[in-house]
Image (cartoon, grey):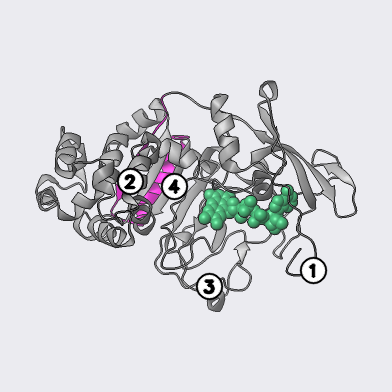
């Protein structure tokens, strides 16, 4: 039964996944969710490009084009699949490889209908290496973060990359809203950060980033910071940090032994992290955070784990805009141009702040912008602009 005209078709029991490793693809049915597919791909030694864990992959591909921080190298939209089978609204069956098949991503700045129901999708498989890890690189200005991201993307350094604003990072790692507010203040006011760039890559990418000489949080420090977060607010050594920092911002991160110092100060542990939760919730979350995946940047990103804390005070993910890689307009976040065409001033979204998430797509030829927005979508920018 549908609320409006039409019917609801439940495809959730169509859960088939068949790996065709010779052709580097997995053929899936429409009930397969992102998490299920990623887990199966991992068991086979591959990675797939998927959206948030509960999303049906055929649904994501048919409606949003599917993007993530891995879009830096894996791309988006048609880059994600090899072929797809549909049942059209007239009952005909077609494959996207048919010469007369509709173009799933043809651009038009009006709302589009799916060409039918996607009944099978051949998803690309990507190789993984055992040396992949993640880092968070803090920046004092958004401009510096953009410069670093574009440099890495165009030089093909890293597999996945995104500029995360402090609101996103602090809400993601904090178990309570109160802690998220405190952590954001510490990052911004006491540590002088404007945003962080998350990079995932193999040892060669990490060596290249190391050669750039930027101070960063490696995986060890990210784990310590996440599991020791409640102590961060009260850590006296934060006051010493400015004395340790020479002219370069965040240079304390480069000091030999800083990881040990941070671990001693933060005393990271799952028990420490959950200490401010309701007592009856603590055992569950303590057990959960004892799992290494929960602080592993690679795992969290390939499974697209999204914190339920994100968007607590307002909606999250209202619009997605693709901008030309060379555009400077997106820096301020208050002029959303690009593939959507110019946006009249009165229709521009009023941004809470020029944050949200930004990421280079396909080695920096496009910048994908998900601004943090307070009010409803303005006309003409609702959802993904134009065709999916
Ligand atoms: C918290 C959150 C985080 C998100 N993160 C990401 C992200 O990281 N990357 C990303 O790309 N997207 C992301 N999204 C968007 C989301 O992945 C898409 O909206 C996706 O379509 C949701 O999947 P679903 O199974 O809930 O789809 P539904 O809401 O069920 O369907 C979405 C649309 O697709 C249609 N549809 C569903 N199945 C089919 C089919 N088999 N054939 C044809 N049409 C179909 C439906 O009719 C509907 O119009 C996020 C959304 C949320 C809410």
The nearer-to-camera label among 4 and 1 is 1
Mark 4 and ligand 1: say if the CB distance to the nearest ligand atom is below 8 Å: no
Q: Are marks 2 and 4 in contact (CB under 8 Å)?
A: no
**Residue picked out by circle 1:** 5
Question: Looking at the image, which residue sits at the far front?
Answer: 280
For ligand 1, tell me if the residue under mark 1 lies within 8 Å: no
Residue occupying image coordinates x 31% and y 58%: 180
> Which one is earlier in the sequence, the residue at label 3 or at label 1?
1
Is 294 situated above or below 8?
above
Query: Which element is circle 1 on?
Result: loop
Sequence-first disc among 2 and 1: 1
Left or right: 132 in relation to 17: left
> Which residue is disc 2 drawn over?
283
- Residue bearing mark 4: 162
Front residue of 100/270: it is 270
**What SS does tag 3 mark?**
loop
Residue 128 painted magenta: no
Does 168 sit above or below residue 299? Answer: below
Q: Spatial distance from mark 2 to mark 1, Cα to Cα?
A: 46 Å
Image coordinates for residue 178, horizontal then vertical, percent: 29, 62
- The numbered dot on residue 348 is 3
Give the magenta range.
131-158
Instruction: Judge by depth and name the residue closer to the eye, 316 or 287.
Output: 287
Gap between marks 3 and 4 measured at Cα:
23 Å
> Residue 181: x and y, percent?
29, 62
């Amino acid at each position: 039964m549908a609320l409006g005209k039409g019917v609801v078709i439940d495809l959730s029991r169509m859960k088939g996944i068949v790996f065709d490793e010779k052709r580097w693809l997995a053929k899936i049915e429409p009930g397969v969710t992102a998490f299920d597919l990623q887990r199966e791909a991992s068991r086979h030694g591959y990675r797939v490009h998927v959206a948030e864990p509960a999303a049906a992959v055929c649904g994501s591909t048919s409606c949003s084009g599917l993007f993530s921080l891995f879009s830096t190298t894996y791309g988006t939209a048609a880059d994600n699949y090899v072929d797809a089978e549909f049942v059209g609204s007239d009952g005909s069956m077609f494959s996207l490889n048919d010469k007369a098949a509709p173009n799933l991503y043809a651009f038009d700045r009006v709302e589009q209908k799916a060409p039918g129901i996607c009944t099978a999708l051949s998803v690309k498989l990507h190789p993984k290496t055992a040396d992949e890890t993640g880092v968070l690189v803090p920046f004092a200005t958004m401009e510096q973060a953009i410069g670093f991201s574009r440099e890495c993307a165009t030089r093909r350094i890293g597999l996945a990359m995104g500029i995360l604003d402090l609101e996103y990072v602090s809400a993601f790692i904090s178990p309570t809203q109160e802690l998220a507010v405190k952590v954001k203040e510490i990052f911004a006011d006491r540590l002088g950060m404007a945003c962080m760039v998350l990079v995932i890559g193999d040892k060669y990418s990490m060596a290249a980033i190391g050669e750039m000489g930027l101070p960063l949080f490696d995986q060890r420090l990210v784990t310590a910071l996440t599991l020791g977060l409640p102590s961060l607010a009260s850590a006296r050594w934060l006051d010493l940090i400015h004395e340790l920092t020479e002219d370069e911002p965040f240079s304390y991160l480069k000091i030999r032994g800083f990881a040990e110092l941070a671990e001693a100060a933060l005393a990271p542990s799952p028990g420490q992290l959950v200490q401010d939760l309701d007592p009856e919730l603590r055992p569950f979350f303590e057990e959960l955070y004892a799992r290494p995946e929960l602080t592993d940047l690679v795992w969290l990103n390939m499974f697209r784990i999204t914190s339920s804390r994100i968007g607590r005070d307002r909606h999250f993910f209202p619009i997605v805009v693709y901008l030309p890689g060379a555009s400077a307009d997106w820096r301020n976040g208050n002029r959303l141009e690009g593939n959507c065409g110019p946006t009249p001033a009165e229709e521009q979204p009023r941004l809470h702040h020029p944050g949200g998430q930004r990421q280079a797509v396909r080695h920096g030829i496009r910048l994908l912008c998900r601004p943090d927005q307070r009010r409803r979508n303005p006309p003409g920018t609702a959802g993904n602009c134009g065709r999916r």
